[in-house]
Amino acid sequence: MSARRATPRPLPAPLHPTDPAGAALQHHLHTAARAFLEQDRLVRHQVPGSVERLRGYARRIRDALRACAPLVEPRWGEQLVVELRWLERALTAEHDREVALARLLRVLDAVPDDPGSVRARHLLERRLSRELAEARVATLNALSSSRYRLLVDRLTLVLHELPGTSIAGRSCTEVLPALAAMAFRRLARAARRLDADHGAYEEWRHARVLARCGRCAAEVCADVFGEPARAFAGQLGRLVDVLGVHEDATKAAEAARAAANTPRIAPQTMFTLGFLYATERAAALNARREFRHAWSEATKKKWRRWLDETEPGGNAGSAHPWALVELKDCEPDDEL
């Protein structure tokens, strides 16, 4: 019997803080992998939105593997992360073009029609629609490849087994809050270096990767420790969303700039494209400032009080002997 047809192991009963930490991660990955496989079925039937949801669940699984790396057998986890990263990159080009086109056309919808805006709309639709069509072909090729089918088989096996380390056998109370605290400290170090006015785009994108890892670590904790951990994950999720707007606006601005480099376009069209570029750059800057407000809220002690109450020693910053095995760094080029 193939792995794809095997009967998945039932989800465990509600987790208890004394249960092994590996069981909590298995529970989280089991849920995400089932959702991924359901989207895979819908993709085959060309259900609208299924490709984007497939990409989202692939990202969730990868975030969980990175956030909880000390619990997973290194070689197995790293190989799965590499394959999930490949899939995300294959699906992201289509997503980026769709979002950029939608954002730019929304701005044009809010301005009066004149020769410049009409020509800019036609240019953007023609240019980005062509790129979008090319990206869709690449998406279909990826989803039809043997590499993708092997990835699906690997994710099916996640429903049955999670190769773990000795740390995975330790209790949730001993392990999971420390993982969440380490992920949050990494994000905090990155957030302190961000400059809303002059910071490079890559630094903000890196912060989003770390925020996603932190959110995922908190979500794994939420399956065990309940609402306090879930509320903390919600605060980190707000940071992820704000930084996602920053990424989308930045990419839309670059799409407008690229269109402005089209040879022999009329001055009115150039002016409109410059206006679009400036509008999206302003939206990106606004997202950076909104992040500062969201970060101020997320760092309030009330959201992390559960860490003090659950982590051994009563100190969210304390280190366990095994914690020298730190979370794997999420490098900026690790994410699109």
Image: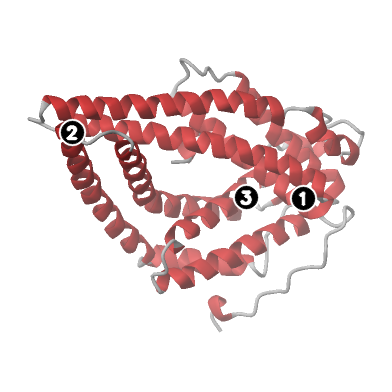
**Residue at the front extreme, as displayed:** 112
Query: Is 60 in front, or is 133?
Result: 133
Mark number, residue 203: none
How far apart marks 2 and 3 lie (CA) works out to 51 Å
Query: Is 200 in front, or is 330?
Result: 200
User: Mark 2 or mark 1: which comes first in sequence?
Assistant: 2
What amino acid is found at the position of numbered circle 2 in the picture?
Asp
Query: Is 246 in front, or is 74?
Result: 246
Q: Give the quarter of the image for residue 275.
A: top left
**Residue 265 seen in render:** yes
Q: Residue at x 36, y 65 (%)?
A: 145
Which residue is label 1 attached to? 222
Question: Tag 1's secondary structure?
Answer: helix
What amino acid is found at the position of numbered circle 1 in the picture?
Ala
Q: For the residue carrying disc 2, how many other residues have a C-alpha within 10 Å: few (<14), some (14-19), or many (20+)?
A: few
What amino acid is found at the position of numbered circle 3 in the picture?
Leu
Q: Is residue 113 left or right of residue 316?
A: left
Q: For the residue carrying disc 1, how many other residues have a C-alpha within 10 Å: few (<14), some (14-19), or many (20+)?
A: many
Mark number, residue 114: 2
